[in-house]
Amino acid sequence: MSQFSHLAAYYDCLIDQSVYPRFSKRITALLRGAGICDGILLELCCGTGSLTRLLSEQGYEMIGCDISPEMLDVARTKCAELPIPPVLICQPADELDLYGTVRGAVCCLDSVNYFTDLRELKRVFSRVSLFLEPGGLFLFDIRSRGLFLELNGTASIQETEDFFCSWQYGFDPRSGRGMHQVDIFQKTGDKYHRFTEIHEQRCYSIETLKSALFDAGFSTCDVYDGFTTKHAANEKGRLLFVARK
């Protein structure tokens, strides 16, 4: 089963929505600090469009790209009433094909970790670089190895009146592969229908990602400790990469 097909309809109920304003605030500050105060931005792996909408409200013209048509359907509805609705395209990130260049690009909520083949990830970086204007920024976050280790063997449950969902996490330190299984039980009358998705991710070191970015044509890369302004001192928690072309 493809990732985020059944999950799309429940995604906004399952993901803590308070994370998006934090992303938007930090990303906007970094973009404006680099002189990118308006113009066209790309959100790669935009999902249901929560961040796309917030960045549009900050004055940017948005392009949202995602491989899941189900997630894009939710994003289209969510962003329909914006003064300038985003352009939404359904494409694999490593085959990104835009009509022109963008001033900046973002890819959030550890979407980069979903590219489990380093060669594929390098193609993604190359495609972003191809359509990014000189001096433009590419911002993305990852789950670090430390965060994968923290999640390994844990589980969580979320419940509403209409459904409940369980998450089970696993991580293989040797291969650097993380797996999480999502089981959604949708209530229909007096019965529950179960939908299951298996999500695979991979952890990458800071040096591996920096090397891939430089190979793709980026000139500098700073790495921050999550949403803070502190440069990352280790590979723990969530890390934010800011690469300049």
Image: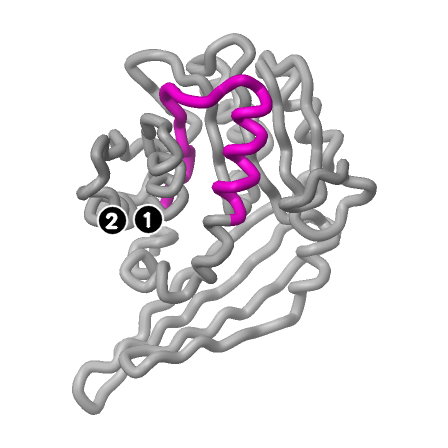
Q: Amino acid at mark 1?
A: Thr
The stretch of residues the image draws in magenta is 22-48
Q: Dot 1, how many residues are within 10 Å of its Cα: few (below 14), some (14-19), or many (20+)? A: many
Q: Quadrant of residue 39 in the image?
A: top left
Residue placed furthest toward the top? 134
Q: Which mark is residue 78?
A: 2
74 or 124, nearer to the observer: 74
Give the vertical position of 45 relative to 77 (above or below): above
Q: Are marks 2 and 1 in contact (CB under 8 Å)?
A: yes
Q: Residue at x 54, y 39 (%)?
A: 112
Disc 1 target residue = 48
Residue placed furthest toward the bottom? 190
Q: Residue at x 39, y 34 (%)?
A: 58
Q: CA distance from mark 2 to mark 1?
A: 8 Å
Residue 36 lies in magenta, yes or no? yes
Marks 2 and 1: which is nearer the front?
Answer: 2
**Where's residue 33, x and y in %?**
59, 24
Q: Quadrant of residue 161 in the image?
A: bottom left
**Where's residue 235, x and y in %?**
76, 45
